[in-house]
Amino acid sequence: MKAIFPKITLRRFIGMVLGNVGLAVSVCFFRMAALGNDPFSGMMVAITEFTGVKYSICLITLNCFLFLFEIFKGRDMIGLGTLVNWFLIGYIVDFLYPFMVDFGHNTLMWQRIIYLALGVIITSMGCSMYQQAKAGIAPYDSISLIFDRETKVPYFWCRMATDVMCVIVCFALGGLLGIGTIICAFGLGPFISFFNRTTSAAFYGTRKQNTKNP
């Protein structure tokens, strides 16, 4: 059990929780902007609409398959953060969104652009914070990290590739695509890499270390 859920420091636990809460907050901002979700969320919505199955069930089911890949190739990436991201993000979003939507949903375009920008930035920072906590990586996020490690291709290219694949699936299933989806598909990788080197490195005290992999 210790090999799967190793002990983590209080700082890394707090960083992991903050990162995941940030991801939930960013989903709310994307929804308020109504300009397109991040690629993975957009793909999941498309799958839900295409199959008629609830979002939560689709998400958990797909993560089960992705988790198999993580077990075989990235077992060291599994931890408490894996479960928090996997099972609780949706509930956090459901709790926060009604409060945040009071700020306005169908608002002026400049306000929606601000919401979109906040969504992109908070998503990137949140993903970096919870990944660099080394407390466990979500099944989907582990894919780009595993390919980075196995192929030596820079992380932001690996992340960009997985996000673009989600966009393709979303489009093929007739899902809603927007400028937010495109920005996330081509921008999350570089943004996450930036926050790995800056915010997360400073928070975890790893500025002089290689912070690409958990």
Image: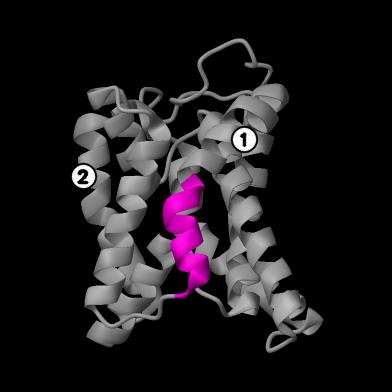
- Above or below residue 21? Residue 155 is above
Q: Considering only order in the chain, which callout, 1 or 2, is on the residue closer to the N terminus? A: 2
* Residue 28 placement (x, y as % from top left): 63, 70
* Secondary element at image label 2: helix
In-front residue for pair 101/9? 101
Q: Quadrant of residue 192?
A: top right
Please give the residue where the numbered disc 1 appears in the rendered image: 195
* Residue 151 placement (x, y as % from top left): 23, 25
- The residue depicted at 33 percent of the width and 78 percent of the height is 46
Per the rendering, the mark at residue 68 is 2
Q: From the viewer's perspective, is 202 left or right of 188? A: right
User: Nearer the observer, disc 2 or disc 1?
Assistant: 1
In-front residue for pair 56/180? 180
* Secondary element at image label 1: helix
Report the amino acid beneath label 1.
Phe
In-front residue for pair 110/21? 110
- Above or below residue 49? Residue 7 is above
- Above or below residue 199? Residue 27 is below
In the rendered structure, which segment of residues is drawn in magenta?
178-188
Q: Main secondary structure of the magenta part?
A: helix
Q: From the viewer's perspective, is 84 left or right of 143? A: right
Quarter occupied by the N terminus: top left
Per the rendering, the mark at residue 21 is none
Report the amino acid beneath label 2.
Leu
Q: Residues within 10 Å of mark 1 (few under 14, many from 20)?
A: many
- The residue depicted at 56 percent of the width and 42 percent of the height is 191
